[in-house]
Amino acid sequence: MGFRCGIVGLPNVGKSTLFNALTQTAQAQAENYPFCTIEPNIGEVTVPDERLDNLAETAKSAAKIPTRMTFVDIAGLVEGASKGEGLGNKFLANIREMDAVAYVLRCFDNDDISHVNGKIDPVSDSQTVETELMMADMESLERRLPTLEKKSRGGDKESQEMLPVVKDILALLEEGQPARSLQIAADQVRTLRGLQLLTSKPVLYVCNVDEDAASEGNNYSRAIEELAGLEGASSIVISAEIESELSQLGNSDRKEYMLELGVKEAGLDRMISSGYELLDLMTYFTAGPKESRAWTIPNGSTAPEAAGVIHTDFEKGFIRAEVIPYQEYVSLGGELNCKEAGKMRVEGKDYIVKDGDVIYFRFNV
């Protein structure tokens, strides 16, 4: 399990260039005209984690399998997308399938690259994207409301649970606030997810800057950083142009080039770490002679829930989890030495998995 991140934004902000760089492919066209990405381009990338490398070496694993993240480059949105303008309907449908959404915003000046609105204003661009998504959510909920009210009066339990959530979200949307800003009880989270609202997705603001601003950002990106801060969201600065160049280099050349530019971390790594924070995800591992593997789970997952990511039978027939912390596994030289040193713990169904745990599950089906 990894996660799916939709790359969205207005036309000509650098979405496809960034997608190509992040996935190190040439699937997406990156031409200077709107809607060059008509079908969503999908690319999977491995999530870099040096802990997996160390585990595989310690366990002398024949294979090493990292967790993966899926990027989806979605067609450029324009004002009126919620009413079907441009490729609006396709755009909006694709977003519903994402776990998180990255708003790519143009934060650079270049007279040779046209802007759909004729000016560079990333804050306004982000508001255009957000407004279209909110309008689409309002339309969706308003269509559902009469049916929910009728079923609720008839005693339908699911409708009775959903109706107050829908009304609260509609009130927020009418005030210009996205659905993700709704404060809800823990038992209502599943209801909110079931509505599949566009503005309920966690958002990462990606400021696409030119090469000169890659290390420190610029006034455009600082305006977005301020906006993100007010919303309690995250923003990162990336130069799609630089990332495109980095994707063509080998590891040693890539590190040297980043050093010259003053860029401490590749854009892919920053987007992945930001995505994990957005979705509150973590990684645990399985390790042995056959393979060492990374698994992505939500923070707070129990041992049976973590086992279920491997296979549903593991969760259904869960007996116990044999757990070794990553540092102990590597420093002591593997599972056998950890057992002998008393560093392997046996945990039951209530155990909350910790980031970096190396686990062997016992189950019966």
Image (cartoon, rainbow, N blue to C red):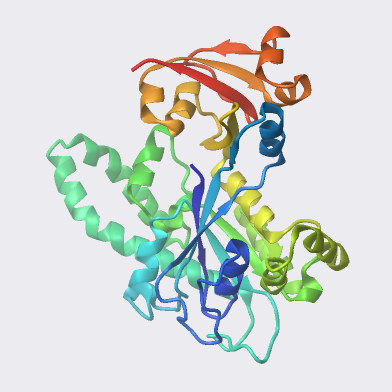
Q: Nearer the viewer, residue 217 or 54?
A: 54
* Quadrant assignment, res 263: bottom right
* Quadrant assignment, res 125: bottom right
Residue 242 placed where, x, y %? 73, 71
Q: Residue at x 50, y 24 (%)?
A: 302
Horizontally, is 257 left or right of 1 in the view? right
Q: Nearer the viewer, residue 186 or 345?
A: 345
Q: Nearer the viewer, residue 94 or 115?
A: 94
Horizontally, is 362 left or right of 247 in the view? left
Horizontally, is 276 left or right of 164 in the view? right
Against 45, is 160 above or below? above
Horizontally, is 364 left or right of 28 in the view? left
Q: How many marks?
A: 0
Q: Residue at x 36, y 56 (%)?
A: 170
Q: Residue furthest left?
A: 154
Residue 80 placed where, x, y %? 39, 78
Q: Residue at x 72, y 34 (%)?
A: 54
Residue 59 placed where, x, y %? 66, 27
Residue 132 placed where, x, y %? 43, 70
Quadrant of the image containing the C terminus = top left
Q: Residue furthest bottom?
A: 112
Against 21, is 64 above or below? above
Against 12, is 243 above or below? above
